[in-house]
Image (spheres, grey):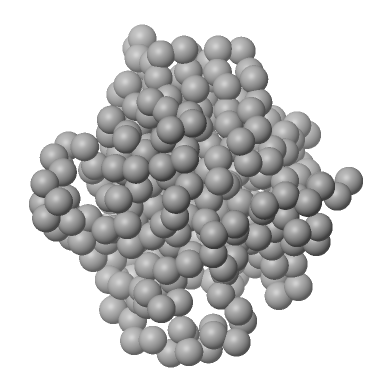
Amino acid sequence: MTPAKTDHFDGRRFVNPYGSAGQPFSKVPRMLLTRRTPWPLNVDEPPSKPPALDGAAAVVTFIGHATFLIQTPAGNVLTDPMYSRRAGPLNILGPRRVRQPAVRFDDLPPISTVLLSHNHYDHCDVPTLRKLAARFDPMVVTPLGNSAIARAAGIRRVEELDWWQDLQMPAMSISLTPAYHFSARGPFDKNRALWGGFMMALPSKRVYFAGDSAYGPHFAHIGRRLGPIDLALLPIGAYEPRWFMSVVHMNPAEAVQAHLDLQAVESIAMHFGTFQLTAEGIDEPVRALNAELRDRNVPPERFRAIGFGASVRL
């Protein structure tokens, strides 16, 4: 059923209420000619095993890119699960990962829920969804228009949400939040599916996962409407060149502003150091984040880039 027209759906495609929903295809060739800082072919780091929950309200473990394991008493949640070697069609095209997932798939605890923010290949990986369906039979929560991908991967239970809609679950609720981004799996389906972030409300804590987003006024709206936020998971990478990427991804300075807009107690960085999607160097997002925190006198413990495989307890 086609959704009704809203400020982010024009009756045919989804849109951003306050900016472009992605760049036109005509600008892509110029972007691809941008000089890129070389990345290493491989960053060899030993995998980690998730710690026990041990009475915490939540334990959040950074697996890599936008994939987090969020362990809670209400069940274990995986965000934008991506375990494939490449972020692209058929796992043979697209950027190759330089860091392996920091938690091996076989070491994951039982996964009850998957949060799928949008349909880009580095966030919506069908081979990983297929493995999750076979092993855990999780429920997938995703924005409007994305259920067909999940069901094609063997997911039996899919809940589609529009921005600001809630899904009530035992001991946890999940809200879909706005994001400033776009969607596409190929050249002919641009913005046919919605994109977004998620707020997880546990009995005593709130965890916000931003998905992919450029900077915009929605962060302040989310903070006012769904706060207080105990932990925000915010993207800091894949932002150069700015003339192209500013309507797609935040740079580290904008991520710090998003953290302040959200009024989050603590933020953790993501979306860096795994796939070279854009022109900046592999370590530049973290350096720029730390410099921005110093310049703005934000305590470094308020917004951190934790290690791959590291965990935060709430």
Q: Residue furthest top?
A: 55
Q: Quadrant of residue 287?
A: bottom left
Instruction: Tell me where residue 72 appears, x and y as whole percent.
Output: 46, 19
Q: Quadrant of residue 243?
A: bottom left
Q: Residue at x 28, y 34 (%)?
A: 266
Instruction: Tell me where residue 74 appears, x and y as whole percent.
Output: 53, 15
In the picture provided, is 156 more to the left or to the right than 121? right
In the picture provided, is 15 more to the left or to the right than 98? right
Q: Nearer the viewer, residue 228 or 171?
A: 228
In the picture provided, is 79 more to the left or to the right than 243? right
**In this view, 150 is above or below 182:** above
Instruction: Tell me where residue 303 appears, x and y as whole percent.
Output: 24, 42
**In this view, 76 is above or below 132:** above
* Total residue callouts: 0
For residue 51, say whether it is visible. no
Q: Residue at x 61, y 36 (%)?
A: 164
Q: Nearer the viewer, residue 204 or 116?
A: 204
**In this view, 174 is above or below 305:** above
Q: Quadrant of residue 19?
A: bottom right
For residue 206, say whether it is visible. yes
Instruction: Tell me where residue 210 appears, x and y as whole percent.
Output: 46, 45
| Image quadrant where one finds the C terminus | top left
Q: Residue at x 44, y 55 (%)?
A: 216
In the picture provided, is 78 more to the left or to the right than 267? right
Q: Residue at x 48, y 65 (%)?
A: 248
Q: Nearer the viewer, residue 176 or 141?
A: 176
